[in-house]
């Protein structure tokens, strides 16, 4: 438990919740706690109070960080392996509850965040298999996404996996580390400025490595489990789900995405911190574009990307007069 002045205390969970015992989610049900003025006398006056889980860092409760919170429920689908941390902070602080990079906490915790029915100001972001949460688009959540060129994202993934083999990457959670470990080992010795080295690494990739790099966006929008393979037929499923999003942007036109998000949230777009494209990754992406094996691995995402670009042409040309959702 903390506020703007720092940590206040660590409060044990001593309240038994029978429901979690009955559902088999906890052995003794001691997952609740009670906080009142007998514990913190000036509880009412602590305007910046925040409560996090001591082990995972998961936000449990916080008082609004701004004078007026945004009365919306928003989920930002993250499609890059590198999260947009600054963007999520910039947006999330305007909401009563925020949970960024939610994939770190697993499916059950993510569902609980979506089920916070008593809160009308929620911002969630993460690399989700979105079909598992599609029902919440009918329950008040507005989805937004910033898509990336498939070759650039593949370049980024290979770069991060190679780096992961030699050093700890702070934004990867425990689940990510387990899933990505085989791929990190596989790409550990790849030479990023060599087309031959990239080609051999992709050709020799075993299935557990392919699961990390094969058409990741189509997988996120069309599948329900990480191991599920994607086919051309899944492209239509992915596009159908994407059509339900309030905002779809592409990183090659970040101004459109900034204006659209600003209009949806009702906040200034002047300081929106979107990650820049890096020339080193652009160079790797260029090498990958020349490889047939890379094209095969990204086949569904390339088809998906083509249709999205075609669909967005009219909306993009209308800015800044009109912003299409």
Image: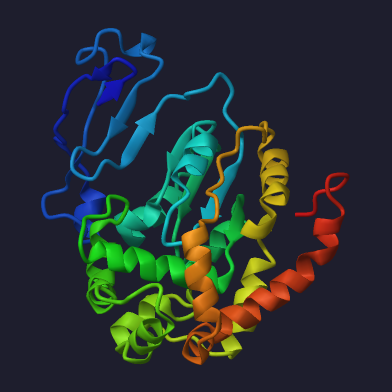
Going by the image, does 96 lie left or right of 259? left
The residue depicted at 81 percent of the width and 65 percent of the height is 313
| Visible residue check, residue 68 | yes
Give coordinates of residue 283: x percent, y percent.
51, 68
Q: How is the image coloured?
A: rainbow
Q: On the image, which quarter does residue 32 sit in?
A: top left
Q: On the image, which quarter does residue 1 sit in?
A: top left
When the figure is inspected, residue 140 is found, relative to residue 238, above or below; the finding is: above
| Visible residue check, residue 225 | no
Q: Out of 126 and 132, give the one closest to the viewer.
A: 126
Q: Quadrant of the C terminus?
A: bottom right
Residue closest to the far front: 194
The residue depicted at 14 percent of the width and 33 percent of the height is 12
Give coordinates of residue 164: x percent, y percent.
26, 63
Going by the image, does 199 lie left or right of 161? right
Residue closest to the far left: 28
The residue depicted at 53 percent of the width and 22 percent of the height is 66
The residue depicted at 39 percent of the width and 81 percent of the height is 198
Give coordinates of residue 3: x percent, y percent.
32, 20
Q: Out of 167 and 139, give the one closest to the viewer.
A: 167
Q: Out of 186 and 200, give the one closest to the viewer.
A: 200
Q: How many marks?
A: 0
When the figure is inspected, residue 125 is found, relative to residue 243, above or below; the finding is: above
Q: On the image, which quarter does residue 238 sit in?
A: bottom right
Give coordinates of residue 19: x percent, y percent.
26, 51
Going by the image, does 136 lie left or right of 323? left
Q: Out of 323 and 271, give the one closest to the viewer.
A: 271
When the figure is inspected, residue 107 is found, relative to residue 184, above or below; the finding is: above
């Amino acid at each position: 438990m903390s506020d703007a002045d720092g940590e206040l205390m660590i409060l044990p969970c001593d309240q038994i919740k029978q429901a979690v015992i009955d559902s088999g989610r906890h052995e003794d049900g001691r997952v609740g706690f009670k906080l009142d003025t007998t514990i913190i006398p000036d509880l009412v006056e602590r305007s910046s109070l925040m409560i996090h889980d001591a082990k995972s860092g998961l936000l449990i409760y916080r008082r609004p960080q701004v004078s007026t919170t945004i009365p919306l429920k928003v989920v930002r689908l993250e499609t890059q392996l590198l999260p947009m941390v600054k963007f999520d902070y910039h947006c999330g602080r305007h909401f009563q509850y925020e949970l960024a990079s939610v994939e770190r906490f697993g499916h059950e915790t993510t569902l609980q965040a979506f089920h916070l029915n008593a809160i009308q100001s929620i911002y969630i972001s993460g690399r989700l298999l979105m079909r598992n949460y599609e029902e919440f688009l009918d329950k008040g959540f507005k989805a937004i996404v910033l898509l990336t060129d498939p070759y650039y994202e593949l370049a980024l993934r290979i770069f991060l996996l190679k780096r992961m083999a030699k050093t700890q990457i702070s934004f990867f959670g425990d689940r990510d580390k387990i899933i990505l470990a085989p791929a990190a080992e596989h790409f550990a010795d790849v030479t990023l400025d060599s087309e031959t080295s990239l080609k051999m690494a992709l050709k020799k990739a075993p299935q557990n490595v392919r699961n990390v790099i094969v058409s990741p966006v189509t997988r996120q929008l069309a599948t329900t489990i990480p191991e599920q393979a994607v086919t051309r037929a899944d492209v239509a499923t992915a596009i159908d789900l994407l059509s339900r999003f309030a905002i779809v942007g592409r990183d090659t036109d970040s101004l459109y995405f900034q204006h659209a998000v600003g209009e949806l949230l009702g906040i200034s777009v002047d300081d929106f911190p979107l990650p820049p494209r890096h020339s080193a990754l652009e160079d790797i992406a260029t090498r990958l574009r020349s490889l047939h094996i890379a094209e095969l691995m990204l086949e569904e995402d390339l088809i998906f990307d083509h249709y999205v670009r075609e669909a967005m042409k009219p909306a993009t040309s209308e800015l800044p007069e009109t912003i299409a959702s």
